[in-house]
Image (cartoon, rainbow, N blue to C red):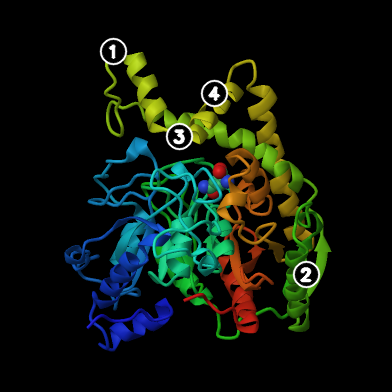
């Protein structure tokens, strides 16, 4: 009989441990549900049923594996050997990597079962999961309003991006947790729109080995889940130094699972005034105030703080991102792997490269490569690239200053509004969307700080509103303690 999926990882682990369900039964149920929910377009690849039992982790685990039998989805920019890894792009459409990303291997070693790869904006550039070669992913929230027939929709709410497939998979109960990646907000933005937890860990606390790079100096793998405890256990399983990634660092191996009630007493929580920016919906502002006063009632010291360089973060990112993109994308030339143009009459290596890259990348990726190469021209380098690095330092200093003397954590909105509809979203191009959507998420990437998106409540129109906790480097455990308290108090009801 088909097992139903439990609500969260903690319950799943208990069911497998006491023998109530078999080791692959939950993964089978997950794959079944993914097939039923094909209309959401959350997955780019689903593991065949016969392959679920083949994912044996380390042969002799020291203790019972912490995620035994737990079905987990992986964003399609993490390499998993034997599975296609496309980054949502024609360029990598038929690419099957010969190796597995460290964070994925750690999940498998802990007993998790990878049930498939999730949809994303091409190479992680976007905020809607609308720019993928596989077509857009649909947010589960609000979908019933738009359903015309079983498979066609006249509109839907975007899930956010670029890890929108992972967020939808978790929000709609297709699996119990997912990996995403976050360079400017790509985990927290979709987590916020889909009403799930989304952790962007401290830069360097997780290995990037096997994560196809977007912006090396800001990319971090992270997790999406339905509870704070699940988020913490996934983080604990995958964190730590990796000799294959020289930017990863040694961090304490102690667990970060919060206590049952969470801890907020005497924690100083800053509300950065610059985050109440133009265009932020009044509903989000009032939710922010409500949660701040809840924490205050629970014994936290809540105070207003200032991060004066916040407003420069987006423009700084719009220079640094294309520069690193231009250099990272140079490897895709159709020679060693990836798409290769078969157009007739290509009579030089140069023209093969140009045609291949024209066919393989969408206009967003091509636009960023051109912008990056322009910023990196000898005559522009100081004016743009070096200048942006200096501003990045000022943004980081803003955070360091508040940690030094004012507060332990920051509480902020994640997005300016609830999830827009697809038809609203595509009225602005990718660049304009990023400049609005990443306002509250991007500064944490500039400074390499950990940040967690926490679902709080539903808006008047029934869509999730979320808030973000940001902390100093390596303060994940403290973030989980405060988040746990918020989770207990707000009691957010998941969609499925
Ligand atoms: N909006 C950002 C961009 O398009 C998101 C990047 C990310 O976090 N992957 O670059």
Q: Residue visible at 28% across and 89% down?
A: 18
Q: What numbered label is drawn on residue 492? A: none
- Secondary structure under badge 4? helix
**Upstream in sequence: badge 2 or badge 3:** 2
Dot in front, 4 or 2: 2
Q: Assess disc 1: are there few (<14), some (14-19) or many (≥20) residues with their C-alpha within 10 Å of its C-alpha.
A: few
Mark sitting on residue 373: 4
Q: Rounded to the nearest whole Å, what is the CA distance between mark 4 and mark 2?
A: 43 Å
As helix, strand or loop, the secondary structure at mark 2 comes to helix
Q: In percent of the image, x 78 and y 57: which residue is there?
A: 276
- Mark 3: which secondary structure? loop
- Find the distance from the CA under tag 1 to the CA under tag 2: 61 Å
State the residue position of label 2: 286
Sooner in the amino-acid sequence: mark 4 or mark 2: 2
Please identify, in this view, whether the residue under mark 2 or under mark 3 is nearer the observer: 3
Q: Which mark is residue 345?
A: 1
Q: Residue farthest to the top?
A: 347
Sequence order check: which comes first, mark 4 or mark 3?
Answer: 3
Asked if labels 4 and 1 touch by Cβ distance under 8 angstroms, the answer is: no
Q: For this view, does 92 lie left or right of residue 395?
A: left
In the picture of the structure, the residue carrying the numbered disc 3 is 362
- Residue 100 location in percent, x, y? 29, 51
Q: Secondary structure at mark 1?
A: loop
Question: Mark 3 packing: few (<14 Cα in 10 Å), some, or many (20+)?
Answer: some
Q: Nearer the viewer, residue 162 or 159?
A: 159
Q: Mark 2 to mark 3: distance in Å?
A: 39 Å
């Amino acid at each position: 009989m088909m097992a139903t999926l439990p609500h969260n990882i903690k319950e799943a682990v208990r069911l497998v441990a006491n023998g109530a369900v078999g080791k692959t039964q939950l993964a089978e149920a997950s794959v079944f549900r993914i097939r039923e929910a094909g209309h959401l377009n959350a997955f780019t690849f689903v593991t065949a049923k016969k392959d679920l039992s083949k994912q044996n982790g380390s042969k002799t685990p020291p203790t019972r594996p912490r995620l035994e039998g737990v079905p987990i989805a992986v964003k399609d920019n993490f390499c998993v050997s034997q599975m296609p890894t496309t980054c949502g792009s024609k360029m990598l459409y038929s690419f099957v990597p010969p190796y597995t990303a460290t964070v994925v291997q750690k999940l498998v070693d802990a007993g998790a079962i990878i049930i498939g790869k999730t949809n994303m904006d091409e190479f992680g550039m976007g905020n809607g999961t609308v720019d993928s070669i596989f077509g857009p992913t649909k947010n589960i929230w609000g979908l019933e309003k738009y359903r015309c027939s079983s498979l066609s929709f006249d509109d839907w709410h975007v899930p956010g991006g670029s890890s929108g497939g992972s967020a939808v998979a978790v929000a709609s109960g297709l699996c119990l947790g997912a990996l995403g990646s976050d360079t400017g907000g790509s985990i927290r933005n979709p987590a916020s729109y889909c009403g799930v937890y989304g952790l962007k860990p401290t830069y360097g606390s997780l290995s990037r080995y096997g994560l196809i790079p977007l912006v090396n100096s800001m990319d971090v793998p992270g997790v999406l889940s339905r509870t704070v405890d699940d988020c913490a256990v996934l983080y604990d399983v995958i964190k730590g130094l990796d000799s294959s990634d020289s930017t990863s660092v040694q961090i304490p191996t102690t667990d970060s699972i919060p206590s049952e009630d969470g801890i907020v007493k005497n924690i100083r929580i800053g509300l950065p005034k610059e985050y109440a920016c133009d265009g932020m919906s009044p509903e989000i502002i009032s939710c922010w105030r409500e949660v701040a006063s809840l924490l205050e009632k629970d014994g936290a010291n809540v105070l207003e703080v200032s991060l004066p360089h916040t407003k420069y973060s987006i423009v700084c990112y719009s220079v640094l991102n294309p520069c690193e993109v231009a250099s990272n994308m140079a490897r895709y030339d159709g020679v060693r792997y990836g798409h290769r143009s078969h157009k007739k009459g290509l009579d030089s290596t140069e023209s093969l490269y140009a045609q291949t890259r024209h066919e393989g990348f969408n206009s967003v990726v091509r636009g960023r490569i051109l912008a990056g190469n322009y910023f990196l021209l000898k005559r522009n380098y100081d004016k743009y690239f070096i200048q942006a690095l200096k501003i990045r330092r000022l943004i980081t200093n803003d955070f360091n200053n508040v940690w030094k003397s004012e507060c332990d954590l920051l509480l902020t909105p994640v997005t300016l509004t609830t999830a827009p509809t697809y038809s609203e979203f595509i009225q602005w191009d990718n660049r304009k969307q990023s400049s609005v959507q990443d306002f509250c998420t991007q500064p944490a990437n500039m400074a390499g700080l950990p940040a967690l998106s926490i679902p709080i409540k539903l808006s008047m129109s029934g869509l999730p509103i979320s808030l973000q906790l940001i902390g100093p480097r390596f303060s994940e455990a403290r973030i989980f303690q405060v988040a746990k308290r918020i989770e207990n108090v707000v009691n957010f009801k998941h969609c499925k």
